[in-house]
Image: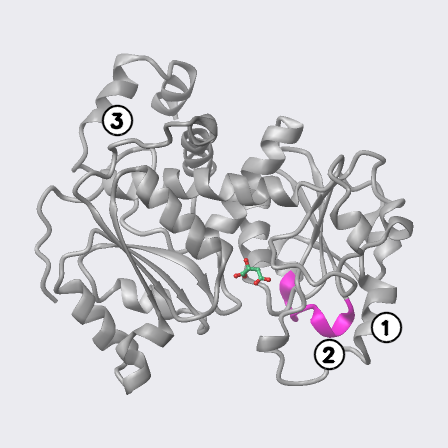
């Protein structure tokens, strides 16, 4: 604890420089080989990643965005599910830190020819990547894959389980706007049942001392979720009352194998965020959405584009900085020469 405070308090101190300049041994700041989820991360570890990301925000706004932190490193983005912002964001993050980046998707991989996930992982592992960034539709698939490779693995979203970098970028966005996470009241609204974003955010926000409410139709609230220390509401007016943050979730129809609500029109009427419902939150409450947004389904267009309060674009910007911080933290823990074979 003591060293962490020293690290944060004096970022130019010798301790800080030593930690940042000697890659290869496990870092006390983020002493993990992989980033598979927020669950299990400590407050200090989350704060460390946010602090590092903070530094990259300014760098990303400069004309010269390049650093050499990941020079010589190879990063493979392996996406078995569609993605625009997350994949692009990881690619930019890696390139801005000087890594060589390969992008693979289901349509360009041998999975199409019947290869299993683990065979694909073994094949890629034999090419000595340093970090694999993986998105998969099955909860737990990324963790399984991480046990079969020598490199570091980042979970870029696995089924409805976790999406750790999304929660980190949300936290960075909130912290930069409101100066803190502790003590805030955050309403996460919509399709909680299928949302990895909700799960990662619940873990992160609770760990950092925020209070979390979930607001959704009963059919989209997973049973037992209250054990995660959240308050559950089925009415937007009550759920949004006095909230500092209103975080909307996309209806994840690709994961729905039953009818969870009568119609989209009705869903919007009762759970879509419009100004009437927003009026229950604090007058300066921030509006968030991880994207992609379904306008007129979970959020009204005008509210989404209300840039005084909607931080949806800032979330995308923070995504690159957060992913830079995560890649850097994991690369710092890589041995100088990996063994490379399964
Ligand atoms: C995700 O991949 O989970 C997204 O960031 C959010 C969504 O797809 O709704």
Q: Secondary structure at mark 3?
A: helix
The residue under label 1 is 266
Residue at (67% x, 68% y) in the render? 251
Specify which label sits upstream in the sequence, 2 or 1: 2
| In this picture, residue 282 sits left or right of residue 125 | right
Query: For mark 1, does the 10 Å Cα neighbourhood hold few (<14), some (14 to 19), or many (20 or more) residues?
Result: few
Which contiguous range is marked in magenta?
217-225
Cα–Cα gap, marks 3 and 2: 49 Å
Quarter of the figure with the N terminus: top left
Residue that label 3 marks: 20
Q: Is residue 39 visible?
A: no
Is residue 234 shown above or below 339? below
Residue 223 part of the magenta-drawn span = yes
Residue at the extreme front of the image, as rendered: 63
| Residue at position x 47%, y 26% in the image | 58
In the picture of the structure, the residue carrying the numbered disc 2 is 260
Distance between the alpha carbons at the discs numbered 3 and 1: 53 Å
């Amino acid at each position: 604890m003591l060293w962490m405070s020293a690290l944060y308090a004096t970022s130019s101190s010798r301790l800080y420089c030593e930690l940042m300049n000697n890659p290869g041994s496990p870092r006390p700041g983020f002493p993990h080989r992989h980033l598979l989820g927020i669950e299990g991360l400590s407050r200090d570890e989350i704060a460390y990643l946010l602090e590092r990301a903070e530094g990259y925000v300014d760098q990303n706004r400069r004309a010269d965005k390049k650093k050499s932190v990941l020079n010589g490193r190879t990063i493979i983005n392996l996406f078995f599910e569609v993605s625009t912002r997350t994949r692009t964001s990881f690619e930019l993050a890696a390139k801005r830190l000087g890594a060589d980046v390969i992008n693979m998707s289901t349509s360009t991989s041998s999975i199409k020819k019947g290869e299993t996930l683990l065979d694909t992982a073994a094949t890629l592992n034999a090419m000595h990547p340093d970090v694999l960034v993986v998105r998969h539709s099955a909860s737990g698939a990324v963790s399984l894959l991480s046990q079969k490779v020598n490199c570091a693995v980042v979970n870029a979203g696995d089924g409805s389980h976790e999406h750790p970098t999304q929660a980190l970028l949300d936290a960075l966005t909130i912290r930069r706007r409101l100066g803190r996470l502790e003590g805030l009241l955050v309403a996460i609204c919509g399709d909680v049942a299928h949302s990895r974003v909700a799960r990662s955010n619940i873990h992160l926000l609770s760990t950092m001392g925020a209070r979390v409410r979930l607001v959704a139709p009963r059919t989209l609230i997973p049973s037992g979720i209250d054990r995660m220390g959240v308050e559950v509401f089925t009415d937007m007016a009550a759920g949004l009352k006095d909230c500092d943050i209103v975080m909307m979730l996309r209806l994840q129809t690709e994961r729905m194998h039953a009818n969870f609500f009568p119609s989209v029109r009705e869903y919007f009427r009762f759970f879509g965020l419009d100004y009437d419902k927003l009026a229950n939150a604090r007058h300066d409450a921030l509006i968030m959405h991880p994207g992609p947004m379904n306008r007129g389904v979970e959020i009204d267009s005008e509210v989404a584009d209300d840039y005084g309060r909607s931080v949806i674009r800032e979330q995308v910007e923070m995504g690159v900085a957060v992913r830079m911080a995560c890649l850097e933290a994991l690369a710092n823990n890589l041995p100088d020469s990996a063994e490379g074979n399964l």
